[in-house]
Image (tube, rainbow, N blue to C red):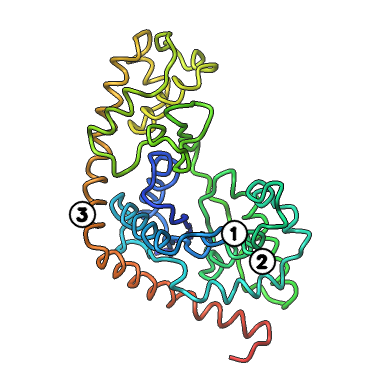
Amino acid sequence: MTAKQRIFSGIQPSGVPTLGNYLGAIRNWVALQDEYECIYCVVDWHAITQWQEPRQLADQTREMAAALLACGVDPARSIFFNQSAVAAHVRLAWIFECVARIGWLNRMTQFKDKAGKDRESASAGLYTYPVLMAADILAYKATHVPVGDDQRQHLELANDIVQKFNHDYGTEFFPQIVPLILGPAARVMSLRDGSKKMSKSDPSDQSRINLTDDADAIALKVRRAKTDPEPLPSEPAGLEKRPEARNLVGIYAALEGSDPASVLAEHGNKGFGPFKEALAELLIAKLSPIAAETRRLLADPGQIEAELRRGAVKAAEIADPIVTEAEKLVGLLR
């Protein structure tokens, strides 16, 4: 039997995920467990590239872990842990920082976006973030990484590091990483503004569906979601210049596992009232079990932490020998 290919993917500990996080990434993580050897990580070291209130960071790490477990990330079928529990990541990151070139990092557009005009005040960690990301992946010699558009450049940098490390040390030790393209991602926008992504940073909680929202909260948010006065069109082309309508139809299609054309075949040429009611019912049916399980797990933080520790032991069993061998290749005494 052919061994499964190995995937690594990480997510920032930003607290309870939103519907956008779920449809854009988390449900794909769950599905990939059947086909790949999956290593999933709450990347708390990455989080501190920008200052975090310590107690809040710990709480948000537990909240993200609980939500991922509730969504179906299964420690029996994958390895699941928090990044800072496995020291191999930073050991390899230092080697990779010595391999990566300043010019490569200067081209990273995400740093420019996050640092903004005040880049001189940004942390060095934010600048070298993509190097730690490369170490996260290659500490396990992972061959595939599910990526969105915002991470493609970082993956290209990781492969540049692999190529230079292997060349400099006369080896083929680290594999090239293959981006895993999972088809069109569900791009979920704000319920208050269809031109902006759904985000936890939005000051209005009405802009998003949180995975711990109860049925009443979901129904209210959908009912209040911004729309326009026209009925739904009969075909997807009619959504082109209607961002709020396009967003709600896209959410429905993603949850149902269909496409906008199928949704509009059923709900087109009707007002938003009946459609919002149907969308709320679908959201409640899909998310209520996740919300209930997330709340159950959060009631026992010790259980969450124990699960993360067990995952970290399994992760270290893979990563430590790989990173130790990389250190020997560099000439460090081990």
Compare marks 3 and 2 and give the one earlier in the sequence: 2
Mark 2 and mark 1 residues within 8 Å of each other at the beta carbon? yes
Q: In percent of the image, x 54 and y 16: which residue is there? A: 241
Q: Which residue is mark 2?
A: 162
- Quarter occupied by residue 274: top left
Q: Which residue is mark 1?
A: 177
Compare marks 2 and 1 and give the one earlier in the sequence: 2
The image position of residue 125, as x and y in percent, is 62, 64
Q: How many marks?
A: 3
Mark 1 and mark 3 residues within 8 Å of each other at the beta carbon? no
Q: Is residue 85 above or below residue 251?
A: below
Q: Which residue is mark 3?
A: 296
Assess disc 1: are there few (<14), some (14-19) or many (≥20) residues with their C-alpha within 10 Å of its C-alpha.
many
Q: Is residue 189 above or below residue 245?
A: below
Q: Nearer the viewer, residue 162 or 114?
A: 114
Mark yes or no: residue 220 visible: yes
Tell whether 43 sits left or right of 224: right
Q: Nearer the viewer, mark 1 or mark 3?
A: 3
Badge 1 element: loop
Tell whether 20 sits left or right of 124: left
Mark 3 and mark 2 residues within 8 Å of each other at the beta carbon? no
The image position of residue 166, as x and y in percent, is 69, 72
Image quarter hosting the N terminus? bottom left
Mark yes or no: residue 5 visible: no
